[in-house]
Amino acid sequence: MSEQTLVSKEKLAERVREMGRQITDDLMGQQVVMICILKGAVHFFSDLTRAIDLPVNDVMDDFMQVWSYAGKNTTKVVTITKEPTVSFKGKVVLIVEDVTDRCYTMREVVDYFLKHGAAKVLVAVLFDKPSAHEVEFTPDYIGFSIGPEFIVGYGLDYNEIYRNVPEVRVLQG
Ligand code: IMP
Ligand code: MG
């Protein structure tokens, strides 16, 4: 297995700051609960939440864990293994996800928040693979649109390794 750099840590930081500015403009004046989808979105979430400049009373952070992958393959069955605890009823939920691939995961997660009373659900994804979608889904905020390649680093894993790599790489082989 070999790896090749796709996005440097400088480019990641720059794009996340831009996304933060846009989300700040769009959500000013609203009550927002930001949801980190564990574990892959952890670094993106940490950087994005600090790049969003909304009043402190208007933003809460929480975490959710969802399971669907084994190695490079989705099982299509999405299981929620940790539910959020912060109350998001009547608020805007901003889901922060690492990558949308076939989109089974985001469809399930968005439905969960709508079913449990969110006023509105938005999705910010760092990487979108439009050519891999099997479920119809369009993220509201996209960091980078990429091909169907398997990527690792900046939180993204292959069998739990590579998450600590500061840049994003394509895994080949
Ligand atoms: P989906 O349901 O196929 O959209 O899968 C999305 C989930 O699969 C993400 O939350 C990731 O955890 C994982 N995933 C999809 N593509 C990749 C990848 O290229 N690298 C690492 N994880 C991925
Ligand atoms: Mg994930």
Image: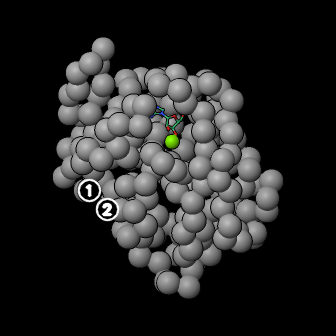
Q: Is the residue at mark 2 in contact range of ligand 2, meaning its CB lies under 8 Å from it?
A: no
**Dot 2 crowding, Cα within 10 Å, few <14, some 14–19, many 20+:** some
User: Vertically, is 13 above or below 21?
Assistant: above
Q: Residue at x 65, y 26 (%)?
A: 76
Q: Secondary structure at mark 2?
A: helix
Q: Residue at x 25, y 56 (%)?
A: 14
Amino acid bearing label 2: Arg
Q: Secondary structure at mark 1?
A: helix
Looking at the rendering, which quadrant does residue 42 occupy? bottom left
Amino acid bearing label 1: Ala
Q: Residue at x 35, y 62 (%)?
A: 47
Q: Which residue was labeled with disc 2?
A: 17
User: Vertically, is 80 above or below 134?
Assistant: below
Q: Is residue 61 left or right of residue 115?
A: left
- Residue 20: percent from the left, percent from the top? 39, 64
Q: Residue at x 80, y 53 (%)?
A: 115
Label pair 1/2, CB-CB below 8 angstroms: yes
- Residue 37: percent from the left, percent from the top? 54, 51
Image quarter where the C terminus lies is top left
Can residue 137 be seen from the camera position used here? no
Q: Is the residue at mark 1 in contact range of ligand 1, meaning its CB lies under 8 Å from it?
A: no
- Residue 11: percent from the left, percent from the top? 22, 49
Count of picture labels: 2
> How far, Cα to Cα, is label 1 from label 2?
6 Å
Q: Is residue 173 left or right of residue 42?
A: left
Can residue 120 be seen from the camera position used here? yes
Disc number placed over residue 109 in the picture, else none: none
Disc number placed over residue 13 in the picture, else none: 1
Seen as rendered, the residue at the extreme top is 173
- Residue 70: percent from the left, percent from the top? 53, 26
**Dot 1 crowding, Cα within 10 Å, few <14, some 14–19, many 20+:** some
